[in-house]
Image (cartoon, rainbow, N blue to C red):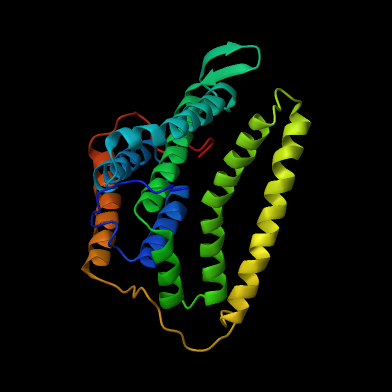
Amino acid sequence: MNLSFDFQETWLHKTNPTFKLFIMVGMFIFVLFVHRLNWMIYLTTGAFLLFWFFSGHPKKRLMLILIPFLLVFVSTGTSMIFFGKGETTWFKWGLVHITEESFYRGIHLGFRALIFAILGLTFTLTTRPVYLFYSLMQQVKLKPKYAYSFMAGMRLIPIMVEEFFTIRNAMRVRGVGKQSLYFKLKSYTIPLLSQSIRRAHRIAIAMEAKRFSGDGERTYYYQIGYSVKDGFFLLTILSLILLTYYSASWWPLFPVEDVRFGV
């Protein structure tokens, strides 16, 4: 089963995958310490522009991918807005207690969840897994037995999906109609699991036979190195942080600074 999608390659696809991974992890940690609502909104907007214009995928596909994360944004934000702490009450009914503090903190929390999703999607949509593992082997000396094991595991996913549809079609041909949830779970999981174990065993034997468990010097089919695109990516992320910081200072969207309660 072919699960690949057509896309246009941009400069983000040519950035070193390991370097991009470290920068993204750094951004995740950095965002955790951003407590200014206006800055968080501008940061999310900047990350969204990077995702929207430079991921290289059709806009319709990007919109479809974003839908579940928008629901996460709404659910995360409303939970904090309805049940968060605060002193300036706007609305109270039963357990629902909306305050000014919980409102701003809910919006902040929603945007934090959204920027995590956008950065993660940007990395995922602009990084080929094969290049990432080759880069990890060459730049951070990840052992080949781990890298190739991950790549083999990812290759099994479309095979399992194909097997799932094969089992479903076979059950339809044999006249298996509406059954209980337990029957369906047993009918699908046991053959899928047994096939996966057998296939994983064969792959492990093949990898050991080809000396993937050794620690000697290896040659690589894909040579992944650094380029000027990496510097441009780092410059883009730093510019994003600085521009959004000054934008939040000069053009605040909400009359609030730190959203932490009691600070």
Who's the residue at 46% across and 85% down the image?
A: 218
- The residue lying at 22 percent from left, 62 percent from top is 232
Q: Is residue 149 above or below residue 159?
A: below
Quadrant in the picture for residue 10:
bottom left
Question: Horizontal and vertical percent for residue 112?
Answer: 45, 40
Determine the residue located farthest toward the bottom in the rendered image: 216
Is residue 215 something that shows in the picture? Answer: yes
Q: Residue furthest toward the top?
A: 93
Residue in front for this viewpoint, 245 or 142: 142
Q: Does 25 appear above or below 161?
A: below
In the image, residue 11 lies at what x, y percent? 23, 57
Q: Nearer the viewer, residue 110 or 191?
A: 191
Q: Is residue 86 visible?
A: no
Q: Is residue 123 above or below residue 170?
A: below
- How many tags in the picture? 0
Tell me which residue sits at (25%, 55%) in the image.
Answer: 236
Quadrant hosting residue 196? bottom right
- Residue 19 is left or right of residue 87, and the answer is left
